[in-house]
Amino acid sequence: MRRALTAATAALTLTTAGTMLAGTPGQAAPTGWGRPIVTAAPQPGAAGLGDTYFPDYGNGGYDVEHYDVRLRYDPATDLLTGTTTILATATQDLSAFNLDFLLDVESVRVNGWAATTSTAGAHELVVTPARTVTRGQQLTIVVRYNGIPSETLVGGYTGWTRTDDGALAVNEPESAWWWFPSNDHPLDKATFDISVSVPTGVEVISNGVQPRPPVAEAGNRTRWIWRTTSPTATYLAFMAIGQYDIVTDTTPGGQPVVNAYSTSLGALGPAARASIERTAEIVDWESGIFGPYPFEAQGGVAGPIDGIGFALETQTRPVYGPGFWRRGANTYVVAHENAHQWFGDSVSVAEWRNIWLNEGFASYAEWLWSEEQGEGTAQEVFDFTYASYPADDEFWQVLPGDPGAARVFDNAVYDRGAMTLHQLRLAVGDDAFFEILPAWTSEHRYGNGTIEQFQALAERISGLDLDDLFTTWLFTAGRPDVATAARKAAPPTEPKSWAKIRESHHLLSH
């Protein structure tokens, strides 16, 4: 996970596109049964999906099935040129629709016809097709564009990280704006083909699998091709471009594993490898708790020294900043980011206010991994985490169930979020708790979920009324009282896993 433009975008105001019309001016209304029949004219699609925190993220009026993103990138200049083909279905009669995008647009075609474009708001590309689009119509939208992503800013910020040898298109909750036009909200998932032409000798890593090896092109260039056939939220698509050592393997079940290590890591390289090379082992262990692994490939990317300062659960292949290896191997962040493949990637938030369903669960996976490794039980990690925050600490004033747009990735969402799950485990018992987790990932596989839906599932399986627990731990400011005589008598002992968990969370949530 990673916070990004949240503070700036939270302040943006959504302008509703269009007004409802009863008919077309100058046209007589049709009649029937002796009275006028009101026919609604096609309307612009909404310039946002109405997310509570980020109302202008995503767009209304269509549903995307697939993105074909074809790019050319030059690390020396940071110039990106591309053609993205979007396959979608109209969900209403459309006179116009929006895409979330920032780079300079050369042309847009809708079903082969040239469309006109304009811009609105901070990141809206408004497309007006030459012909009205009708509800249920299949759309092929082809956008040609170019730009320098690192110099393309919103509120002084870019979600594109330029590095000495390439770039990283990795961020949350927004990154697509800087490299492909999209319907940028987790409610509209799609499959992806991503191909990138770069100078020969530069590597490109992305989501899913390589349907064929890199292809040589004219001008001493090479095209890298990646494909993911699993529904993917737009912010979970990624690119890592630069100098990488790529290690491939298969799991015992035959699934491809692709790990990549920036050659700039130097002395940090062995620690990165000692961590990421355990991905298949960790995913196998997590599958026994969360249910079958939901995607077609596994792996990880250890980014360059001058890259990102966080890690992100990019689908099928998390990307890690170099800070996680500065004190040696760290499998806790690997457990965290791969737990997101279930909690956040396969089951995504219906709105960003539900971020606890991502971060609280991935953080609790670290506690379970600590237990598995014999470095502290989940109860011991809970006790030490709870004791680490005094009752008057600001930490307890942030509500994990509704942290606010500017604090989506606050430390409380992680630590208090994990504490909430441990309290749920204690309340319902291990049998019910470890039934709830895979039931959630199964019932909402490749879809979206809310905290309210998760609570309802937990109540259904446990047979308990859990409203007080969820209200207290997720939606009430202040430190809940869990003190016992034993805890009052002596401070808890620090688990062996604590230093790595704390170090990871410091990088993940700040």
Image (cartoon, helix red, strand yellow):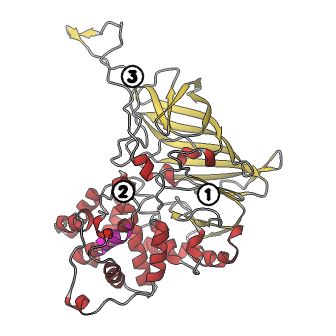
- The amino acid type found where label 3 is placed reads Pro
Q: Residue furthest bottom?
A: 489
Which residue corresponds to mark 2?
444
Q: Residue furthest right?
A: 219
Give the Cα distance between marks 1 and 3: 40 Å
Q: CA distance from mark 2 to mark 1?
A: 24 Å
**Identity of the amino acid at label 2?**
His
Q: Nearer the viewer, residue 424 or 250?
A: 424
Q: Secondary structure at mark 2?
A: loop
Please report the residue visible at 61 percent of the width from the left and 74 percent of the height from the top.
272
Q: Sequence-wise, which precedes: disc 1 or disc 3?
A: 3
Left-right relation of 170 to 3: right
Q: Residues within 10 Å of mark 1 (few under 14, many from 20)?
A: many
Q: Residues within 10 Å of mark 3 (few under 14, many from 20)?
A: many
Residue 322, given in percent of the width and then of the height, sits at: 60, 70
User: Marks 1 and 3: which is nearer the front?
Assistant: 3
Sequence order check: which comes first, mark 3 or mark 2? 3
Residue under pointer 1: 209
> Are discs 3 and 2 less than 8 Å apart at CB?
no
Mark 1 touches mark 3? (CB < 8 Å): no
The numbered mark, 2 or 1, whose residue comes first in the sequence reads: 1
Single out the mark in the foreground, 3 or 2: 3
Mark carried by residue 42: 3
Q: Magenta segment, which residues?
A: 414-422
